[in-house]
Structure formats: structure tokens, C-alpha cells
Amino acid sequence: MKSDLVLDATKFAPTAISKETQLFNDELSALNESYPAFSPTRVGDYRAQAMRGEIAMPRSAILPQAKSITIPSREPGRDIPCRLFFPEGEGTAVEGVFLHIHGGGYVLGSEKVSDTLLQLYANAKSYAVVSVGYRLAPEHPFPAGPQDCYDVSEHLVRKGKDEYGAELKMIGGDSVGANLSVLTALHLLRTFPALSLAGLVLLFGGFSHGVVPSGTTKKGVSLLSQSFWKDLLSCYLPAGSNNGAEALHLYSPEVAPFYADLEEFRGRLPKALFLAGTADVLMDDSVMMCVRWQQAGAEGILRVVPGGAHCFTGLPVEKYPAAKEGLEVVQEFLDETD
């Protein structure tokens, strides 16, 4: 009997992981044990350590061609910091705008930590890439972060053609940035009924905020442990806080897109790439979210990289075959998406 759901099970087998990738994963595990544990009471120190490379959070080199810009927020007098990239090559025309949303568990990271990846996006299809420096928890818990993403996305829909010569076509992010990318896409589809997005690039996303099986069986392998994930979520949506919404919790569709009613958008959802590594505690989220995307009649593409840890596309490709494979998948998706 043929199953309606088909996965390449060989990619999930331990034997599918290359020796080089497994060796790097073992090194990551040892590093994770040596780094100080995250605590919501010392967020500032932890951010500073991450910026200095003293904890295992991937960060690319700062590229000189990037521009720091601001985009107005919904609040008068407050602007949102953003990072802007154009395609390399003299005289290259911009064919579309790509909105990027960084990861970091709603607590860490910024628009300045993914320059190499953002330039890849810009060059892949002649995109102008805008990365959002949304407000972080715990200083700014939900809904501050998503609101900033919504404000920037609306600005790009309204002003993208005037300011960059092209319309918003693509949205993408990594980890919680993938979560926020889906929420932002759904927000735009509600706000602009005539809007058509070309695609979503969703890297190792956390879409459900649940304790999925991959989170309990991959302890210490990736850059994100289940306990670390829970601590980050507690900063984003503190227990007992509704933050202006009735009975809001981590499993509300306004917070976790896995629980959204996607039927509302049947026929309008863009093509989406869900990229996950088998050594990531959030791997099951990508599998499940891709299934929900397909159930709503949209094109959901799941690509699984054996041995890939959380944030694996940000790790050194010369040492980590999983990173090279992941970036090739992203490039393939962008090449095929108009």
C-alpha cells in the first residue's frame, strides 16, 4: 500500500551522517558543555558573550557593502533598524525585495549577524535584501518583535518599488526568524488581499513551541538544547502574561504559526522551503509545518540534511559538509522560484 506521505527515511539514519559532520557535531557538544548556561537574569551578559564568539552562536563576518537603514514603526518617532544589501555587480538591476528575519530565540541576535547569507540571497536572484532589527525579549516581550516585522513588511509592500525598484517577493528567516517569517507572511496576506508572494525560505524553524520528539532525543548535539529553548520562550512570553491578548499562550496562532488556520489562505499561500537538519532539536517542527502547508493546498518543500545541527547553515562550510549542503539547497530553491 502506498502512503500519502512520503519521506526519504534513509536521510534520518545515523549512517547517513558523514564522518566530517559527525566529528563537528561531537565538537559542538563538547563546546556546549563548556559554555556558561543561559539565564533570563543575565541576558545582557549572554548577548555580549555571543557577539564576542564566547558561546556557540553562529555569526558571519560583517560585510562592508551592507548599509544600515531605518524604517518607520507604527509608533510615532520610533524607527526600526534594518540591514540592507543589494546584488553585487555593477549595473545589476533589482528584480525583487527579500525580507529577512534573524533568529536568536527572540532574545539574541540582530540584523547584523547574517551578512554572508544575506549577500547570498541578494546575489541569487538580484534581490534587495532587508533584514529587520526587531525588538528583543525580555525587555520587549511579545508582541513587540512581530509588530516590528509587520511594520517593516508593510512598508516594503507599499514603498518597495519606489525605494528599491521592485516589489516584495520573498520572506525568509532562521530558527525563530522562520516562525516570524510565516507569521509575517500571513499578516501580509490578510492586510493586502491582492498581494502575491513568490516564496518563503524557512531554515530550521520553531513553529509550534512544543516539546517535539526531536527535542527530547537530541540533547547536547546541536547549538540549541531543549532547556535553552524553554528559557528563551519564557523571556518572550512570560508565564501568566497576556500581553494585550485574551488567554494568549505559546500555542496561540498569533505566537506559533503551526496552530494557524491556513485554510483562510487556501490558493494564496506562497511556495515554501522548509530546511532542517536531523541533529536539530527543532527538526520535527519543519516536518510538521511542511505537512500543514501542503494540507492547505500550497507547495511545501521539505529538505532534510543528515547530521545538520541547529543553525547549521551558519557553520563553516570548509569543516562542516552539512552547512555546504544546506546552502546549496537554499540556492537551488531561489534559482527555481520566480
Image (spheres, helix red, strand yellow):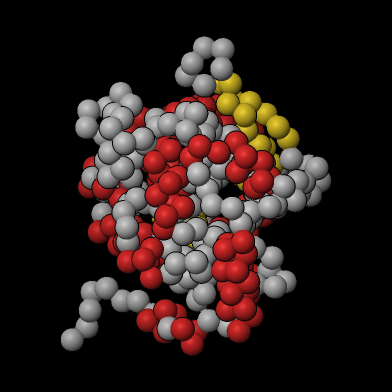
Q: Position of residue 120 (x, y in %)?
A: 67, 55
Q: Position of residue 252 (x, y in %)?
A: 27, 40
In terms of depth relative to the viewer, which is nearer, 2 or 114? Answer: 114
Q: Position of residue 212 (x, y in %)?
A: 32, 61
Residue at 62% x, 39% y: name it. 45
Residue 157 visible in the displayed image? no
Residue at 58% x, 21% y: name it. 79
For the N terminus, the image quarter is: bottom left
In terms of depth relative to the viewer, which is nearer, 102 or 296? Answer: 102
Snapshot quadrant of residue 99 = top right
Q: Position of residue 228 (x, y in %)?
A: 46, 52
**Numbered disc total:** 0
Residue at 44% x, 80% y: name it. 11
Residue at 52% x, 12% y: name it. 76
Compared to 62, does 167 lie above or below?
Answer: above
Image-based side of 172 in relation to 7, left or right: right
Residue 258 visible in the displayed image? yes
Snapshot quadrant of residue 56 = bottom right
